[in-house]
Amino acid sequence: MKVFQGIYRVWVTILTAAVVLQIFFAGYGAFDAAHKLDKDGSTIDQDGFNASFDPHIATGYFIWLGGIIFLLISFGTRTRSKIFRALGVAGLLTLQVLLAWIGYGVPWVAGGLHPINGFIILGFLGAITYREWKGRAETAEAVPATATPAA
């Protein structure tokens, strides 16, 4: 059980860092596509556009898979609150993938909500990460020091 708690803590930290990387790749994709337009003043085809966002898309699927693994890890902790938090992460990540798929057809709704949900995911994962590492530090401080015997 303690092993799963440690894995849970590290895994949520990795997921949080991956979401930050994901936001970087979204910005890269947008500016790379704009750069391709500015280069020769023409339009870019679907392949050129997709190439700009390939890192963002691929990382998104890895993060979604990581969220499912995070949920499975949470069951090993046998802690109800950790399981519910991991379930929330998996749900938000699944919603994120659905918003990405729907966003192509309904950009004003799903496409607009996709980045907002991304920041909600980052905040939620960041809060879980903070709670996990803070809890570990508080546990370490709570261990009483051994007193030296009086003479």
Image (cartoon, rainbow, N blue to C red):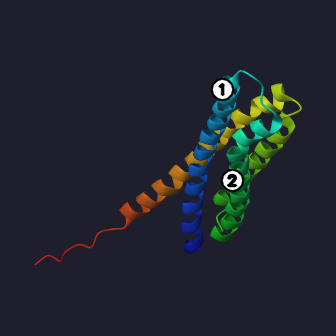
In 3D space, how far apart are the residues under numbered discs 2 and 1 (Cα atoms)? 32 Å
Relative placement, left or right, of 134 versus 2 is: left
- Kind of residue sitting beneath label 1: Lys
**Residue 150 position (above or below residue 109):** below
Give me the residue at 64% from left, 64% from top. Answer: 79
Q: How far from the left and from the top, in percent, is residue 150?
A: 14, 76
Relative placement, left or right, of 140 versus 13 is: left
Image quadrant holding the N terminus, namely bottom right
Disc 1: which residue: 39
**Residue 50 position (above or below residue 135):** above
Relative placement, left or right, of 94 versus 30 is: right
Direction top: furthest residue: 41
Disc 2: which residue: 63
Give me the residue at 69% from left, 53% from top. Answer: 63
Image quadrant holding the C terminus, namely bottom left
- Kind of residue sitting beneath label 2: Ile
Q: How far from the left and from the top, in percent, is residue 44?
A: 77, 30
